């Protein structure tokens, strides 16, 4: 493909420019505090490709940490228990899951979705462990606790969906469960997309793309349900927007890698659109580098090796978040 | 980590389970497909030439899949050009359903400007009764237009014109042919995707589920890791779309709509070979959701080879170069559906 790489670089440059424009727009619209110069556009694809040299196993193990987190969250919410103790061992430090509870769902559809997603996430853990074999990392310590100092509450406080010092319990209601799921699902989509170019084996790349697609279905389910329920309960949309803005504030201020769900009305008169799929101007979902993913998992804009949902950090070779502080 | 060997073994086990389920589903659903579908099923022989290209481990431990006689060799351009055909189809369908007008001429002509885009037959604005579904339609339409623009930019002067597209809602429309074959209407009835919210959802379901499997299947031929990321990203967007359509059908509370989606899924599955790589939106009998069409053994969305994708786009289980939604075929180097 003679022209493709050049075109792709051009397209990504254009995309970065558009992102910056939109970022400017949102900055103004949201009245956010000063954001670093929009010219710092190069963050993104190019950086995530060249930033570090990692093996395919390193990348798959990085993903496995995220799947442990997701599988435990959904398994607790749907079934009232964490993942089986025979699927947590491996290299690194085995950790416990703190917190977690079964949700007393009121909407049968939300309960069905929770069960379906839980089964997929457990299958992802098993798949990655089977592929990695003896090099699979152990489950790290995971914080699903619901007190005011737990990771969910910290995120909800920082996003402004609960008051400072107040608790947010994602297992307390259908709505809270959906917001908790929202926090994870979009993150994992961008993590897997960002991982694709780090993988050298095309067989693994195809597998990663397949898990990416599954996570995209999950994210769509969660976002679409929040959007639909947001007709009657507008706070669901605005709270999802706030969580999105919070994620975006952690992963680097010069880039927009996240979008809320509230409807948008283009200026061309084509009519109001939902925002179930968070994409750039090309209609393509975003990528995050491993460091940016860890910013959100650790709930920190700084370069750190633990925090948030992973109080002792993740296992494997990719453990440090990006310095965006 | 002996990557290719391990993954091949894990995937082989999954493939075996899929085949077993396929056997079960075939015997369970033969009656449902009898109307108009019998010839399709009959064409689904026991041959497995359409099997997704499982990467072949090499003795050197190289992670690259080794092309074999049954695994065609395509390059990055071939895959992008192939995908563009599908995006033309999707963009025209969703844009017309959502806004009443399709892609502008400058987004359908060839890169050298010498060939105008092929004609689009049919398509019109849906008078949505549910405003949320209308908002979904407009969002998806905008994304699909973005995909057309993106792929055209990547292909540059080499971009091929839009092929002729049939998205008509009349008796000779591709949607009607699919609906008849699936048994959701009688063999002389007409299916108009633009007539109601429910019909729009079914038509969108028919097209959208195909896309994540097409992008995942196409990735195996893409050598550039950066381009793989782009392909994976478009496939992810399509998965969001597909999930939205599937969950909207599931939560509609309309049992006929849910059952019809299942029949369209069975049609797709009957067209693309003997593998079971398609699923409806609900698990029969239990009420459990099945929004993600994935292999239950690993939670991974299915892949289709380009030829299998064309089986569905052409609405034929046979080897063909045109039909269905592409009455004159697709443009590029990947043009032929699989046949047993």
Image (cartoon, coloured by chain):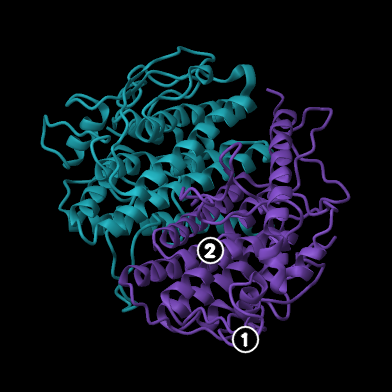
Chain colours: A cyan, B purple
Q: Are marks 2 and 1 in contact (CB under 8 Å)?
A: no
What's the chain of the residue with tag 2? B
Callout 1: helix, strand or loop?
Answer: loop
Callout 2: helix, strand or loop?
Answer: helix
Q: Quadrant of the N terminus of chain B?
A: top right
Q: Nearer the viewer, residue B67 or A254?
A: B67
Q: Earlier in the sequence, mark 2 or mark 1?
A: 1
Q: Quadrant of residue B266?
A: bottom right
Task: Using the image, determine if residue B306 lies above or below residue B189.
Answer: above
Which mark, residue B259?
Answer: 2
Task: Using the image, determine if residue B5 lies above or below residue B18.
Answer: above
Residue drawn at (27%, 59%) of the image: A262
The x and y percentages for residue A6 are 59, 56
Q: Can residue A261 be seen in this snapshot? A: no
The x and y percentages for residue B10 are 69, 32
Residue drawn at (83%, 63%) of the image: B339
Residue drawn at (75%, 29%) of the image: B5
> In the image as oriented, which residue stretches furthest toward the right?
B69
Q: Nearer the viewer, residue A14 or A180?
A: A180
Q: Quadrant of the C terminus of chain B?
A: bottom right
Which mark, residue A274?
Answer: none
């Amino acid at each position: 493909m003679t022209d493709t790489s050049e075109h792709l670089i051009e397209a990504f440059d254009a995309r970065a420019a558009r992102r910056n424009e939109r970022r400017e727009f949102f900055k103004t619209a949201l009245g956010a505090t000063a954001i670093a110069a929009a010219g710092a556009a190069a963050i993104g694809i190019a950086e995530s490709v060249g930033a570090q040299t990692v093996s395919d196993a390193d990348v798959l193990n990085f993903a496995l940490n995220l799947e442990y987190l997701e599988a435990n969250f959904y398994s607790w919410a749907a079934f009232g228990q964490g993942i089986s103790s025979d699927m947590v061992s491996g290299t690194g430090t085995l950790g416990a899951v703190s917190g977690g509870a079964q949700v007393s769902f009121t909407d049968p559809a939300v309960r069905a979705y929770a069960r379906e997603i839980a089964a997929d996430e457990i299958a992802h853990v098993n798949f990655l462990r089977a592929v990695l074999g003896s090099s699979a990392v152990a489950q790290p310590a995971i914080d699903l606790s619901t007190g005011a100092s737990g990771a969910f509450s910290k995120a909800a406080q920082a996003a402004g969906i609960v008051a400072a010092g107040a608790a947010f319990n994602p297992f307390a209601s259908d709505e809270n469960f959906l917001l908790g799921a929202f926090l994870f699902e979009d993150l994992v989509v961008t993590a897997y997309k960002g991982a694709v170019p780090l993988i050298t084996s095309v067989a693994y790349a195809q597998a990663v793309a397949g898990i990416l697609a599954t996570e995209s279905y999950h994210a769509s389910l969660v976002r679409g349900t929040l959007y639909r329920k947001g007709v009657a309960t507008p706070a669901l949309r605005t709270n999802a927007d706030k969580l999105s803005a919070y994620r975006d504030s952690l992963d680097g201020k010069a880039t927009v890698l996240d979008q809320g769900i509230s409807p948008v009305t283009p200026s061309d008169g084509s009519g109001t659109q939902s925002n179930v799929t968070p994409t750039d101007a090309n209609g393509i979902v975003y990528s995050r580098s491993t460091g940016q993913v860890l910013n959100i998992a650790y709930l920190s804009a700084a370069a750190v090796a633990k925090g948030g949902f992973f109080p002792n950090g993740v296992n494997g070779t990719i453990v440090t978040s990006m310095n965006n502080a | 980590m002996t990557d290719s060997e391990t993954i091949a073994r894990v995937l082989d086990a999954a493939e075996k389970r899929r085949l077993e389920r396929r056997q079960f589903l075939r015997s369970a659903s033969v009656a449902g497909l009898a109307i108009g579908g019998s010839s399709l099923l009959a064409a689904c022989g026991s041959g497995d030439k359409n099997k997704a290209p499982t990467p072949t481990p090499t003795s050197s431990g190289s992670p690259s899949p080794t092309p074999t006689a049954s695994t065609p060799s395509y390059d990055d351009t071939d895959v992008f050009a192939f995908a563009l055909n599908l995006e033309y189809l999707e963009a025209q369908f969703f844009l017309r359903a959502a806004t009443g007008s399709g892609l502008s001429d400058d987004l359908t002509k060839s890169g050298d400007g010498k060939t105008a885009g092929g004609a689009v037959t049919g398509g019109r604005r849906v008078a949505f009764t549910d405003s949320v579904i209308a908002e979904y339609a407009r969002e998806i339409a905008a994304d699909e237009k973005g995909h057309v623009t993106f792929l055209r930019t990547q292909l540059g002067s080499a971009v091929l014109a839009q092929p002729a597209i049939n998205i008509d809602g009349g008796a000779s429309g591709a949607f009607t042919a699919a609906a008849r074959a699936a048994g959701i209407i009688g063999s002389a009835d007409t299916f108009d995707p633009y007539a109601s919210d429910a019909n729009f959802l079914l038509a969108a379901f028919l097209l959208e589920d195909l896309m994540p499997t097409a992008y995942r299947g196409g990735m195996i031929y893409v050598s550039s890791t950066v381009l793989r990321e782009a392909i994976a990203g478009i496939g992810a967007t399509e998965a969001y779309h597909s999930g939205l359509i599937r969950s909207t059908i599931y939560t509609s509370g309309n049992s006929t709509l849910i059952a019809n989606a299942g029949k369209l899924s069975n049609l797709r599955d009957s067209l693309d070979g003997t593998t079971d790589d398609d699923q409806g939106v609900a698990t029969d009998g239990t009420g459990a959701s099945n929004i993600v069409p994935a292999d239950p053994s690993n939670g991974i969305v299915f892949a289709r080879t380009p030829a299998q994708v064309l089986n569905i786009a052409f609405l034929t289980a046979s080897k063909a170069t045109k039909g269905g939604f592409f009455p004159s075929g697709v443009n590029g180097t990947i043009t032929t559906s699989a046949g047993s």
